């Protein structure tokens, strides 16, 4: 009987060793984990900074890893289309940059003016003087289109250069001089 009991204890010890060896090793401190790429639902939101306590929201689109990401800022009053475009051109805040957001407009389209005519935002762009080597014009134009069409008073965006409609890249890499909407860049949009 004693020999049988030793066998049971030895088997139990062996099973315990096997079960504990199959787990993930413990760590002394928590560490950040980067999720694998993929279309995962957002699991966390960025807490607004103290400056983001206004009564209305402003939606701006920035870029991260060749994708367009909407950002909601709290501001005191509804911005005009011109103010919203200037906020977009100014780029992400420090907190937004810490979240991995960048601005494809820097270098691609540093100068732009907008006027609203019958629900159409007409954006006049001035090409940059120096070639910056950036190749993300599609994201830059997508940022402007998605930001402005997120407004209730803008149905579409058209780009103008030297007084004529400008052909710009859409999300499918085709060029268009027609009025554009966020649907033209839908393949590039991610929530986070």
Image (cartoon, rainbow, N blue to C red):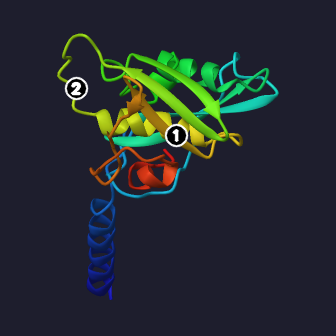
Q: Give residue 183's mark.
A: none
The residue drawn where x is 82% and y is 27% is 55
- Could you say which quadrant of the image residue 156 lies in? top right
Q: Is 115 placed left or right of 171 in the picture?
A: right
> From this viewpoint, which residue is outermost toward the top?
129
Q: Nearer the viewer, residue 62 or 165?
A: 165
Q: Is residue 176 above or below residue 72?
A: below
Image quarter where the N terminus lies is bottom left
Q: Give residue 134's mark.
A: 2
Q: Are marks 1 and 2 in contact (CB under 8 Å)?
A: no
Q: Can you give x and y, in whole percent of width and height, for residue 58 in the image? A: 67, 31
Disc count in the image?
Answer: 2
The residue drawn where x is 33% and y is 59% is 23
- Could you say which quadrant of the image residue 29 lies in? top left
Tell me, yes or no, if residue 108 can be seen here: yes
Mark positioned earlier in the residue sequence (1 or 2): 2
Gap in angstroms between the C-alphas marked 1 and 2: 23 Å
Q: Can you give x and y, in whole percent of width and height, for residue 190 in the image? A: 46, 49
Q: Can you give x and y, in whole percent of width and height, for residue 173 in the image? A: 27, 50
> From this viewpoint, which residue is outermost toward the right?
55
The label nearer to you, 1 versus 2, is 1
Q: Is residue 132 above or below residue 190?
A: above
Pointer 1: residues within 10 angstroms few (<14), some, or many (20+)? many
Query: What SS does tag 1 mark?
Result: strand
Tell me, yes or no, if residue 28 can be seen here: no
Q: Is residue 24 above or below residue 138?
A: below
Q: Can you give x and y, in whole percent of width and height, for residue 93 in the image? A: 52, 18
The residue drawn where x is 63% and y is 31% is 116
Return the residue at label 1. 157
């Amino acid at each position: 009987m004693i020999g049988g009991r030793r066998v049971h204890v030895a088997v139990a010890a062996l099973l315990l060793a096997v079960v504990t060896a199959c787990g993930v090793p413990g760590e002394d401190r928590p560490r950040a984990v980067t999720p694998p790429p993929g279309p995962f639902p957002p699991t966390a939101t960025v807490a607004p900074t103290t400056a983001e306590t206004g009564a209305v929201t402003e939606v701006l689109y920035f870029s991260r890893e060749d994708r367009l990401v909407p950002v909601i800022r709290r501001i005191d009053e509804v911005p005009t289309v011109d103010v919203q475009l200037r906020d977009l051109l100014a780029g992400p805040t420090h907190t937004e940059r810490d979240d991995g957001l960048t601005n494809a407009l820097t270098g691609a389209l540093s100068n732009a003016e907008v006027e609203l005519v019958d629900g159409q935002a007409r954006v006049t762009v001035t090409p940059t003087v120096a070639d910056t080597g950036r190749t993300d014009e599609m994201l830059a134009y997508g940022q402007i289109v998605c930001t402005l069409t997120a407004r209730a008073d803008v149905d579409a965006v058209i780009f103008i250069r030297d007084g004529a409609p400008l052909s710009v890249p859409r999300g499918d890499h085709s060029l268009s001089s027609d009025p554009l909407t966020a649907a033209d860049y839908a393949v590039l949009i991610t929530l986070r």
